[in-house]
Image (cartoon, rainbow, N blue to C red):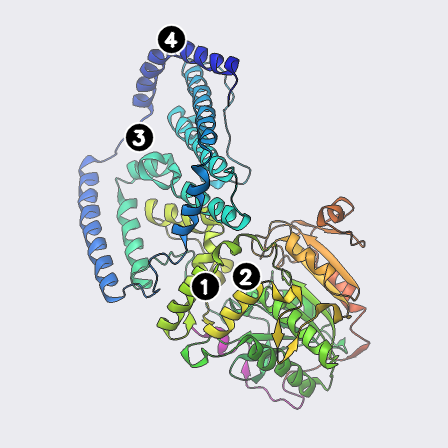
């Protein structure tokens, strides 16, 4: 609660402000009239507004038709379990009404400061903003958000309200940690959705473009919106990039290679050598099957695969199938046997080498961790070292994705997957990941595509992000329940092939890559794996996030990385003793792996061993929709 003197000061502030409010309002009207954006051609503007009205009517009609044809099949009116989350929240909130009284006083005091700041600016005085956007917040980059006093007031008012909402909701006492995280996450989603940058009349850039183009931007924006609804068959599928410009095998995934093996779950790519000699021990990469493999081979200037072949590695990559109803019953164990084990067998036939080094990326790394524990139990030592890109084995601090994992949501997901034919549609998965960065991956495109009426830019990473894949029901539910919900792999309780998995039995060298801003596999979560494996472990933290932190070619000279040979109890201690190096972490990893790759042999050509080439890379699985 505010102290009496603080409250008195606030009341004095209010009385002082009263003296300038009239002058403020007068100057506000005068300044806005002088700086208001003017319609260039009123007649053309009127014609465009008629088009907007017609398109809006068509939009509603088409949306209603699509909903009638494709009603929700989730089986639950509340698939995200929002109702129960906020029932739990309100139950605790009502026990502490004083918390909200104090919060309202704080908000009132902040608004008094904001009015005072605005009044001083209107009177021509210098006045520091009451609140500023956080670093990296791109919503308010247009100069009018700061230079135009009206929009500056709108911006600061929103930021104060959003801060108040999130802190007030997040500080309610008595909530269990999981409920608190869900409340925090969905409160932020609500606050982000209400940003003034997302609306026509409160976004200066949109207002300016609307006036300058006589409203043509809104006509184009509605056309874009209709196309996205058609593409999503009644559900909004926001276009993030030029989907017609990119094509796998034409301007993406161009590193030369051959498909040398395939089964129901994967095609195995062996890449052409780019050196006369290669390390004896092959390198096999298991990417996530939540997306296509070619994140590792987007283009010549950012291809991990091309860079690795140039360093002398014989590179194999698993290109996972995009499963449909036919593969709905494939299990997590099937991905181990028909994925990792099948690839190891194929590599031995292709190269004559039984031993390999392996990489697992994201969920591919989780599978690799489980497989290593299974192999340790069976005495199978074909994998001699393992590298993990942004991969988790301990999910106790797995970040915001935990918000989507509870029994109610998993049951709802299971019903939906059964109704769809036994798989999770890739668009559903993409929406979940986009929500983790809604301002960048949802609202920025709403503004660009629908309000400004612009076409999205051409960006290979966003094309890959939109090139979604499906999840088989048995495999996906096992993964979510065993890892995210119950954390059984880290606890030594996961069972595959009749074996209870124990990661402490894994004694091979391990390299753990993490990223400082990763919101999917947080570095704190990745660091926990240093305490699970019992062999020599190297932990490294890169700059940026889940994708850019991994795919950072040395020639780009971007970001940085941190290394520390010690592995103290906490990651905070590790960071305190870490050494920062500018640029990519790939050379650090190359030095680590080259020492574990054997001597040099004559470079191997795909299809020249016992396995013949089936087709050129990237292969048909990578093109599956």
Mark 3 or 4: the one toward you: 4
- Name the residue located 70 percent from the left edge and 56 percent from the top edge: 585
Distance between the alpha carbons at the discs numbered 1 and 3:
50 Å
Name the residue nearer the viewer: 587 or 495.
495
Q: Mark 3 falls on what kind of element? A: loop
Asked which secondary structure carries label 4, the reply is helix
Residue 556 shows up from this direction = no
Task: Magenta stretch: give its range.
Answer: 607-625
Q: Which residue is mark 4?
A: 19
Sequence-wise, the earlier of marks 3 and 4 is 4
**SS at badge 1:** helix
Mark number, residue 37: 3
Image position of 313 (left or right of 334): right
Q: Position of residue 403 (x, y in %)?
A: 50, 54
Q: Are marks 1 and 3 in contact (CB under 8 Å)?
A: no
Labels 3, 2: front one:
2
Sequence-wise first label, 1 or 4? 4
Query: Which residue is label 2 attached to?
Result: 485
């Amino acid at each position: 609660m505010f102290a009496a003197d603080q409250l008195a000061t606030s009341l004095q502030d209010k009385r002082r402000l009263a003296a300038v409010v009239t002058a403020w309002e007068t100057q506000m009207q005068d300044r806005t009239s002088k700086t208001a954006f003017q319609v260039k051609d009123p007649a053309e503007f009127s014609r465009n507004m008629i088009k907007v009205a017609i398109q809006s009517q068509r939009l509603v009609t088409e949306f209603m038709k699509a909903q009638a044809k494709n009603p929700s099949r989730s089986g639950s009116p509340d698939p995200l379990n929002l109702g129960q989350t906020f029932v739990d929240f309100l139950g605790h909130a009502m026990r502490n009404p004083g918390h909200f009284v104090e919060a309202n006083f704080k908000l009132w005091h902040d608004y008094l400061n904001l009015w005072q700041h605005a009044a001083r600016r209107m009177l021509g005085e210098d006045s520091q903003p009451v609140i500023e956007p956080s670093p990296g917040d791109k919503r308010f980059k247009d100069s009018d958000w700061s230079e135009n006093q009206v929009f500056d007031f709108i911006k600061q008012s929103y930021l104060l309200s959003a801060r108040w909402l999130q802190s007030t909701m997040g500080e309610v006492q008595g909530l269990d940690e999981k409920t608190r995280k869900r409340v925090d996450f969905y409160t932020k989603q609500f606050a982000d959705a209400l940003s003034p940058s997302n609306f026509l009349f409160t976004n200066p850039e949109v207002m300016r473009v609307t006036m300058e183009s006589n409203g043509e931007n809104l006509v184009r924006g509605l056309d874009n919106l209709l196309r996205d609804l058609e593409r999503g068959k009644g559900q909004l599928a926001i276009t993030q990039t030029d989907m017609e410009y990119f094509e796998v095998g034409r301007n993406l995934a161009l590193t030369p290679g051959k498909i040398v093996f395939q089964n129901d779950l994967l095609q195995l790519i062996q890449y052409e050598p780019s050196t006369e000699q290669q390390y004896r021990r092959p390198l096999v990469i298991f990417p996530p099957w939540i997306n296509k493999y070619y994140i590792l081979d987007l283009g010549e200037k950012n291809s991990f695969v091309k860079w690795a072949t140039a360093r002398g590695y014989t590179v194999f990559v698993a290109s996972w199938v995009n499963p449909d109803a036919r593969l709905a019953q494939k299990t997590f164990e099937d991905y181990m046997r028909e994925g990792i084990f099948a690839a190891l067998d194929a590599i031995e036939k292709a190269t004559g080498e039984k031993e390999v080094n392996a990489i697992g990326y994201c969920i591919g790394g989780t599978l690799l961790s489980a497989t290593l524990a299974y192999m340790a139990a069976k005495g199978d030592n074909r994998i001699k070292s393992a590298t993990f890109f942004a991969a988790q084995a301990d999910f106790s601090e797995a970040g915001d994705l935990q918000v989507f994992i509870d029994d109610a949501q998993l049951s709802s997901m299971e019903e939906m997957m059964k109704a769809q034919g036994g798989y999770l549609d890739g668009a559903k998965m993409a929406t979940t990941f986009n929500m983790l960065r809604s301002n960048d991956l949802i609202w920025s495109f709403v503004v660009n595509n629908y309000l400004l009426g612009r076409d999205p830019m051409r960006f290979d990473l966003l094309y890959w992000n939109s090139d979604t894949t499906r999840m088989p029901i048995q495999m996906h539910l096992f993964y979510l329940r065993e890892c995210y919900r119950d954390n059984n792999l880290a606890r030594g309780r996961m069972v595959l092939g009749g074996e209870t998995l124990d990661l402490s039995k894994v004694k091979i060298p391990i390299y753990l890559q993490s990223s400082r801003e990763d919101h999917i596999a947080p570095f704190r979560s990745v660091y926990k794996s240093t305490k699970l494996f019992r062999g020599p472990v190297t932990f490294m933290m890169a700059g940026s996030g889940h994708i850019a932190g991994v795919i950072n070619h040395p020639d780009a000279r971007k970001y940085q990385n941190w290394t520390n040979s010690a592995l103290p109890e906490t990651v905070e201690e590790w960071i305190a003793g870490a050494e920062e190096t500018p640029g990519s972490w790939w050379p650090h990893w190359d030095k680590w792996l080259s020492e574990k790759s054997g001597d040099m042999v004559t470079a191997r050509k795909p299809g020249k061993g016992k396995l013949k080439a089936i087709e050129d890379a990237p292969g048909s699985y990578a093109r599956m929709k």
